Image (cartoon, rainbow, N blue to C red):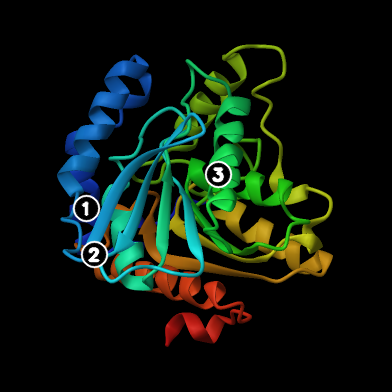
């Protein structure tokens, strides 16, 4: 039997307030609702936490060979490396607006162009469709001369980024990847899934439900979710930064991925953010711990963009 964590001890007052505010918009019962209702709730939640774009960031909505993207740049101009961003939302929710402020702040802090990808969502589309859209956006950016790239994704977007980077691992224009509380495995039990099965904001049962919907959508193998932590050829990946929230059923995914990359001979750093929960990117301006985590993410992106080998010490400078 797994001991239940004492979340009152692990989670501070600021984070509890963020949790309560999130649940006012997206309650525990939301994953049981029709997808249209879930999307409406998710969009309202993201809007409630949205920050204003930094004043020096310019935005353009473009069509990347059939895939909608939003491109961010600073007013003084951005040159050199670009960020490719894949948003979270269980592959079923979110879009260009849900993570607009995150992308704008990455652009402002790093002075890099950021390309936010509006990949197709399940259940109307398939996992293969979403993966194709990420690849199309990357190829479009390559053709426009935007590389090299640091590829960044949170939650389900972390899965899409890891898959895209893996498929392009033999290319030389991806400088690194940053995966924020990603879901990279196929199962929904064992390890942190059991330890944090009843964590605030994301339960193991919710993950199982979403992954079952993934399997049920367009049967025929298109939505088979590979375990990316066990893929062959991990040594060929660019340098990688993975970030776990401690109080998250998926916390082990980021650790296992980084561990296996290093075992294979690659370069990966894993950071576990103490006392934080899944989705804490939205809390970066409300919760000190989340703000510090976002700072490490920004430093990781900036260092990777220069081609310098990232070390753990650099994340805390």
Q: Nearer the viewer, residue 89 or 65?
A: 65
Q: Are marks 1 and 2 in contact (CB under 8 Å)?
A: yes
Q: Nearer the viewer, residue 62 or 183?
A: 62
Residue 72 point in image, percent of width and height: 33, 55
Q: Residue at x 32, y 71 (%)?
A: 109
Q: Residue at x 15, y 56 (%)?
A: 52
Q: Nearer the viewer, residue 278 or 123?
A: 123
Please name the residue that numbered disc 2 is placed on: 287
Q: Which mark is residue 140?
A: 3
Q: Secondary structure at mark 2?
A: loop
Q: Secondary structure at mark 1?
A: helix
Image vertical order of residue 32 relative to residue 275, above or below? above
CA distance for labels 2 and 3: 37 Å
CA distance for labels 1 and 2: 8 Å
Query: N-terminal of the two: label 2 or label 3?
Result: 3
Q: Residue at x 23, y 55 (%)?
A: 16
Please name the residue that numbered disc 1 is placed on: 18
Query: N-terminal of the two: label 3 or label 1?
Result: 1
Q: Quadrant of residue 223?
A: top right
Residue 269 point in image, percent of width and height: 61, 71
Instruction: Say whether residue 149 is left or right of residue 14.
Output: right
- Tell me the quadrant of the picture where the N terminus can be found: top right
């Amino acid at each position: 039997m797994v001991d239940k964590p004492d979340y009152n001890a692990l989670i501070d007052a600021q984070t509890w307030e963020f949790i309560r505010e999130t649940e006012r918009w997206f309650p525990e019962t939301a994953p049981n609702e029709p997808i249209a209702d879930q999307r409406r709730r998710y969009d309202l939640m993201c809007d409630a936490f949205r920050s204003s774009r930094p004043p020096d960031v310019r935005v353009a909505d473009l069509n990347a060979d059939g895939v909608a993207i939003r491109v961010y740049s600073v007013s003084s101009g951005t040159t050199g490396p670009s960020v490719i961003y894949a948003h979270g939302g269980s592959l079923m929710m979110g879009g260009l607006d849900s993570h607009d402020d995150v992308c704008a702040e990455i652009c402002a802090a790093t002075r890099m162009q950021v390309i936010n990808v509006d990949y197709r969502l399940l259940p109307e589309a398939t996992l293969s469709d979403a993966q194709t859209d990420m690849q199309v956006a990357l190829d479009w950016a390559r053709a426009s001369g935007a590389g090299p790239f640091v590829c960044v994704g949170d939650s389900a977007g972390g899965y899409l980024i890891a898959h895209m980077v893996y498929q392009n691992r033999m290319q030389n224009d991806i400088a690194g990847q940053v995966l924020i509380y990603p879901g990279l495995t196929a199962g929904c039990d064992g390890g942190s899934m059991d330890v944090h099965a009843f964590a605030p904001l994301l339960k193991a049962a919710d993950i199982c439900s979403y992954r079952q919907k993934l399997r049920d959508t367009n049967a025929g193998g298109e939505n088979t979710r590979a375990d990316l932590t066990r893929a062959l050829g991990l040594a060929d990946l660019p340098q990688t930064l993975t970030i776990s929230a401690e109080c998250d059923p998926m916390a082990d995914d980021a650790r296992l991925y980084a561990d296996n990359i290093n075992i294979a001979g690659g370069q990966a750093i894993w950071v576990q953010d103490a006392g934080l929960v899944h989705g804490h990117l939205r809390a970066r301006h409300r919760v000190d711990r989340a703000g510090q985590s976002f700072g490490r993410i920004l430093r990781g992106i900036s260092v990777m963009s220069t081609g310098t080998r990232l070390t753990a010490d650099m994340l805390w400078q």
